[in-house]
Amino acid sequence: TSPVECLAFENEEDKVVAGSSGGTLKLWDLERGKVARTLTGHRSNCQCVGWHPYGQFFASGSIDTNLKVWDIRRKECIQTYKGHTRGVSCLKFSPDGRWVASGGDDGSVRLWDLTMGRMLAELQPPAPSGPCPSL
């Protein structure tokens, strides 16, 4: 097993998702006290996770530069967003659940449209810049 790199509580606080340094994600059922699902898809360290406001989806960001959206009912990744040139270090869903923003180790912030499945905007900081620590 790989060490936990990040975790997030679901809005109802009965589930938690944890990302590992090996790229694996574990979905925990807190009422039962056990792992409900183990999901794979990232090639390296999962650096951030966050729940969609409606709770049936979550997103994860990794050093592999990908942002992934997962459906817990279907037990799989339903969308992979590519665009960061370095790892994805933070993410946040919009309150209405239409968009997800990701911040990268490349210093950029990208806004993704979940319905259209594409990037809406890219914000680049003035050079030189460091990683985006939070959104």
Image (cartoon, rainbow, N blue to C red):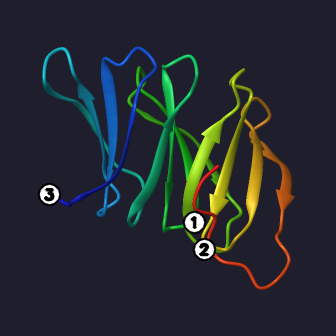
Give x and y (percent) for residue 51.
50, 31
- Please name the residue shown 84% across and 61% down the image: 123
The answer to whether residue 76 is left or right of residue 69 is left
Which of these two is toward me, 124 or 121? 124
- Please name the residue shown 65% across and 58% down the image: 103
The disc labelled 2 sits on which kind of residue? Answer: Arg
Labels 3 & 1 near each other (Cβ < 8 A): no
The disc labelled 3 sits on which kind of residue? Answer: Thr
The disc placed on residue 65 is 1
The disc placed on residue 1 is 3
Which of these two is toward me, 67 or 11? 11
Label 2, secondary structure: give it: loop
- Please name the residue shown 77% across and 47% down the image: 111
Q: Check disc 2 and report the residue beneath it.
A: 86
The answer to whether residue 37 is left or right of residue 19 is left
How many marks the image carries: the answer is: 3
Query: Considering only vertical position in the picture, is 76 above or below 15?
Result: below
**Sequence-wise, which precedes: disc 3 or disc 1?**
3
**Sequence-wise, which precedes: disc 1 or disc 2?**
1
Q: Residues within 10 Å of mark 1 (few under 14, many from 20)?
A: many
Give x and y (percent) for residue 75.
38, 29
The disc labelled 1 sits on which kind of residue? Answer: Thr
- Please name the residue shown 78% across and 45% down the image: 118
Q: CA distance from mark 3 to mark 2?
A: 25 Å
Q: Quadrant of residue 30?
A: top left
**Sequence-wise, which precedes: disc 3 or disc 2?**
3
Label 1, secondary structure: give it: loop
Label 3, secondary structure: give it: loop
Q: CA distance from mark 3 to mark 1?
A: 22 Å
Labels 1 & 2 near each other (Cβ < 8 A): yes
Give x and y (percent) for residue 105.
60, 71
